[in-house]
Image: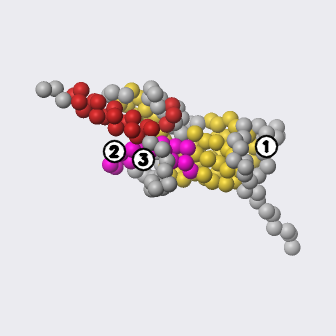
Amino acid sequence: MNRLPTIAVLIVAATIHCWTAKADDDKPKFPAEVRVVSHKTDDDGQLRLRVRLLIDDHVAVYANPVGAPGMAHASARITVLDMNKRAQRAKVNYPAGDKLKTEFFGDWYLYRNSVDIDVVLADNPPLPLIIRAKIAGYDERGSYCLGFGVLETELKLVQKKPEP
């Protein structure tokens, strides 16, 4: 008896479960963090941010775009919010991920270790701002899905010390 169709169905079922998993409070923390590594207002009055995803060594995060058919919802997404949790208009430039060729599901693109993402806010909103990264990925050591994770950091106003 040929087991290949059964194995393929099991892989597809497990993958769909992974893709539709939600970030729950009882799940362990997603093994990555998000930071703002630079910000400045340009001559046109636009706030430019460089956001860095720091990903644990054994983890792969689905890039934006992830490339695999039907996986757009799992692509990494950066959102900028004001302190009232209102989304700000932003243009996000996602870098290409590392290509992973798969036999059954086509090419996937992944972020590993560290990736910088450039964000431009047209309206130059007042600080503080919340930078949110919604990501999904898997643990490469054990080949299991980590589901979705929501990472946040805050870009605060820097208070300058008075000169003596």
Left or right? Give the position of 105 relative to 45.
Answer: left
Q: Would you say the magenta stretch is mainly helix, strand or loop?
A: strand
Give the distance between the C-alpha atoms of the residues marked 3 and 2, in whole angstroms.
10 Å
Q: Please report the residue visible at 47 percent of the width from the left and 39 percent of the height from the top.
A: 62
Pick the front one: 116 or 28: 28
Residue lying at the far bottom in this picture: please name it: 164
Expressed as whole percent of the image width and height from the top left, the position of residue 156 reads 72, 56
Circle nearer the viewer, 3 or 2: 3
Give the distance between the C-alpha atoms of the residues marked 1 and 2, in whole angstroms.
42 Å
Which comes before the other along the chain, label 3 or label 1?
1
Where does label 1 land, which residue?
124
Magenta span contains residue 145? yes
Q: Please report the residue visible at 76 percent of the width from the left and 57 percent of the height from the top.
A: 157
Labels 3 and 1 touching (C-beta < 8 A): no
What is the span of residues highlighted in magenta in the rendered image?
Answer: 134-151
Residue 6, image quadrant: top left
Expressed as whole percent of the image width and height from the top left, the position of residue 91 reads 68, 35
Q: Is residue 47 visible?
A: yes
Left or right? Give the position of 8 relative to 145.
Answer: left
